Image (tube, rainbow, N blue to C red):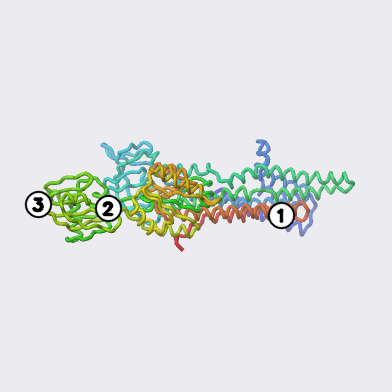
Amino acid sequence: MNRKQKKTLMRIIAALILLLAAAAVDIIAGPARYIRLVIYLVPYIVIGYDILIKAFKGIINGQVFDENFLMAVATVGAMALGEYREGSAVMLFYQIGELFQSIAVGRSRKNIAALMDIRPDCAYVETEGGVEECDPDEVEVGSIIVVKPGEKIPIDGVITEGNSALNTAALTGESLPVDVFEGDSVSSGSINMTGLLRIKTTKPFGESTVSKILELVENSGERKSRSENFISKFARYYTPAVCISALMLGVGVPLIRLALNMQAGLGMWIMRALTFLVISCPCALVISIPLSFFAAIGGAGSEGILIKGSNFIETLSKTKYVVFDKTGTMTKGVFEVVGIHHSKLEDRKLLEIAALAEKNSNHPIARCIVKAAQCELDDSRISDIKEISGEGIRAVIDGKEIYIGNDKLMARAKVSHKDCSSVGSVVHVAIDGEYMGHIVVADVLKKDAAAAVSALKNTGILQTVMLTGDGEAAAEAAAKELNIDKLYSRLMPEDKVKKVEELLDDKRAGSAVAFVGDGINDAPVLTRADIGIAMGALGSDAAIEAADVVLMDDNPLKISKAIRIAKKCMKIVYENIVFAIGVKLICLILGALGIANMWLAIFADVGVMVIAVLNAIRMLRREKSVYVE
């Protein structure tokens, strides 16, 4: 509880004690009317003075029709009619409901505040004169910054010196630390836990990870869902309508009765009108619906899922078709050695020879083989090296002629080689004209990719589709392992857009198509789909900018989690709309007929609001980490 909430709680307790004391005096002594007014007026003023002030300011500013005005008119009217106990009680219970609302909003804001707290206060830049403290906005690209243990990394960059463990929970929702070493890229907002790091910045602060997260969170409230827009319009017309209805009930009906030569019963009808006003207060809807979306955005953010607005939660909840890009989305996006076949040497030795030959090449496959060798490569062992474009490398290592490359290079060297049935790029190795085996290099699937597809189907997804520019063999192997329903390979970026448009035309009415991608060539498709989901950690800036949802740790399992959060949010929203409107309509009819008294009015207003708010804050509970059930 913050200071304001504690103050409200103390006022509630004080007013409750005073109200109980007044009721005891009323029952035991039965004082005169003006004394009853005074003893009930004390708790009423203690608990309701701020509402009366807000109502008065609203009238002066021309903003008459709000809940403060309704509460003020209803309770002052009740006191004027001699219903002192009811008038004080209505104000007391209204403030109790407001306190519940304030606590619920506060809890939701804590999740947002946790995201906002990742902004670093300063950066320590290494200069010729030593280390200087600077504002992150002033650090130039290519600067060397020093990050000590316990400090936040202020700007995206590459580690030039040191190794450490990083706490990335604020970015990804992942509680386990991530080990980083020299040469690794690191994101701003992560916390350095163990070792001193020197980092070369690769982006200005305005384009860094932390800056983009802050921008997304700050702007998320501007994109309202249809449900929120409906409630705003509803409240705009609903409040004046019920005020006019109450006026007609309190004044119009007595006048009609007088015209019909009946007793006006002015006091009874005014009391009904005041009860009608208390019942009609739209707090439950106006508060609980935005709170549900606010809590969902904050809760998703704490899980490493950034949703750019409540309108995207609504669309995400309707997702029935999920389309994946392959490379970098369902695969790691980097080559790895996945097999060594027909080797006449130890696997370690064959890799070492291949790495020596590929040592100075910048080709991704070459870099992958060098990394896999995991050994010290001595340049003195290499006496001659020649790269043959499109085929491979010819080198002299330890005095022996080495050929490392594809089928064409083996044909050039007149070496009989063996084909490979595995999916991937095959690198053949020959030494002094003798075939020594081959190394298979491939872009491997992410650890949780298959589980992610399975989890999506458990959430009710009708169809999963993979779009890729890869050849048929590699694409089909990945699709089969992932259990993807439909596959389209050898696609250009414009072809991916066409396939998504076909899905949009053929989709079931009321459903949505989501596209998940990470590359710069995925930006047009992310924009074209009903909902675009970008892999944030490795994804390109263009993809993140075009997407509606960003997964900060590139884990495809988060896709099903995001959909479940959206569905849960919309379920709570619809529950609150139906419950609040349903109860209020019933109680309004009962109030107009004189069946409902002021105590039922209190439940219809405060009780419904408290129940709706408690239902809304269920969104703050973290989703289970078990994805496949």
> At label 2, which amino acid type do we have?
Ser
Give 24 or 85, whichever is nearer the viewer.
85
Residue 565 percent location from the top left of the image: 50, 54
Give 271 or 262, whichever is nearer the viewer.
262
Q: Which disc, if any, is residue 425?
A: 2
Q: Which residue is mark 3?
A: 399
Local SS, label 3: loop
Q: Quadrant of residue 608?
A: bottom right
Q: Estimate how packed mark 1 is, as few (under 14), some (14 to 19) or many (20 or more) residues with alpha carbons within 10 Å.
A: few
The structure residue drawn at horizontal position 71% and vertical position 54%, both measured from the top left corner, is 586
> At label 3, which amino acid type do we have?
Gly
Q: Estimate how packed mark 3 is, as few (under 14), some (14 to 19) or many (20 or more) residues with alpha carbons within 10 Å.
A: few
Sequence-first tag of 1 and 3: 3
Report whether 235 appears left or right of 130: right
Check the image and report above or below for 187 versus 437: above
Residue 258 percent location from the top left of the image: 87, 45
Local SS, label 1: helix
Give 431 or 506, whichever is nearer the viewer.
506
The structure residue drawn at horizontal position 66% and vertical position 56%, both measured from the top left corner, is 17
Dots 1, 3 in contact, CB < 8 A: no
Q: Which residue is mark 1?
A: 586
Say if residue 296 shows up in the picture: no
